[in-house]
Amino acid sequence: MALLLKGGSIFLHIPKTGGRWVGKVLAAAGLVESELGHMHADADRVLSPSGGSGRHLLAYLLKRKFGILPRTSPFMFCFVRNPLDWYESFFNYNCERGVNWRYEGDVHDPHNWHPNAQLNGLGSSDFNCFVRNVIKAYPGYVTEMYSRFATPQVSFVGKQENLCDDLVTVLKKLQLPFDEKFIRGFEKVGVSPKRSTGLAWDPELKEEVTRLEYAGLTRWGYVASNLTVTNPASPGIQECPAEARC
């Protein structure tokens, strides 16, 4: 869930960026006041009475009635990760037994919203095929998804790669009482197992995805010498065979 913390700040959970760990450690530290809306509610939905299902609307109205929701614009924060790594993490998660590319939400049903509903039906047992499916349908998908969370209203955007350090930084910024050693020693949560095969990027595809996600790579500080785009022209998106399940 998006989380309302004591003091009125709000944590927004972008999928596959370490948010489950953040939510667990914040709750264990006694810093959570309430859940807000959808698990992955973005910046525009988290305080919107129409931003989710009927159950979410009812919860919103009750929290507003009893004064749980902040009355002024809240301090909001979230975490991102390298967009290219996001594709790998999403693929690994969906290839887990019991997940197997199940559909999340429905793009045609506003009451069954999910930030990754657009990816329904694009899965594959082959990593490069999955990525090609995504960029053919939604070029620059991860950058666009992050941007729906990291809007101008969001005060702090940390990185999954520095998750613990950045969480400590934002808690200090909020002047919330917490035990830093407890935060740093908290066990990992929701880490998808690595696959021994299937995650070797096709070099041309990686260059193409880097080009398409370049705005996000630049905005969130991931552009480095090994991420330079050498060919501004698209090498073209290869067609994949029919969708295959893991």
Image (cartoon, rainbow, N blue to C red):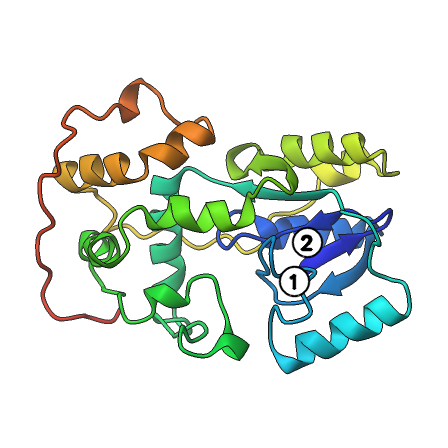
Q: Quadrant of residue 224?
A: top left
* Residue 40, position as x, y percentages in the image: 57, 60
First of labels 1, 2 by sequence position: 1
| Circle number at residue 23 | 2
Toward the bottom, the furthest residue is: 54
Which quadrant holds the C terminus? bottom left
Residue at 69% in and 70% down = 49
Residue extending farthest to the right is: 66
Name the secondary structure under disc 2: helix
Which residue is located at x 50 percent, y 52 percent? 191
Residue placed most toward the observer, 188 or 54:
54
The amino acid on which the numbered mark 2 sits, given as a three-letter code, is Gly
Q: What crowding class fits label 2: few (fewer than 14 Cα within 10 Å), some (14-19), or many (20 or more)?
A: many
Nearer to the camera, 31 or 71? 71
The quarter of the picture where the N terminus appears is bottom right
Q: Are marks 1 and 2 in contact (CB under 8 Å)?
A: yes
Front residue of 185/243: it is 243
Q: Is residue 216 left or right of residue 173?
A: left
User: Seen in the image, is 124 located left or right of residue 215?
Assistant: left
Residue at x 77% of width, y 36% of height? 171
Q: Which residue is mark 1?
A: 1
Residue that appears at 77% across and 47% down: 9
Image side of residue 174 versus residue 117, left or right: right
Which amino acid type is marked by label 1?
Answer: Met
Q: Is residue 245 visible?
A: yes
- Whether 81 is drawn above or below 149: the answer is above
Between marks 1 and 2, how big is the CA–CA gap?
A: 8 Å
Q: Which of the 4 image quadrants contains residue 221?
A: top left
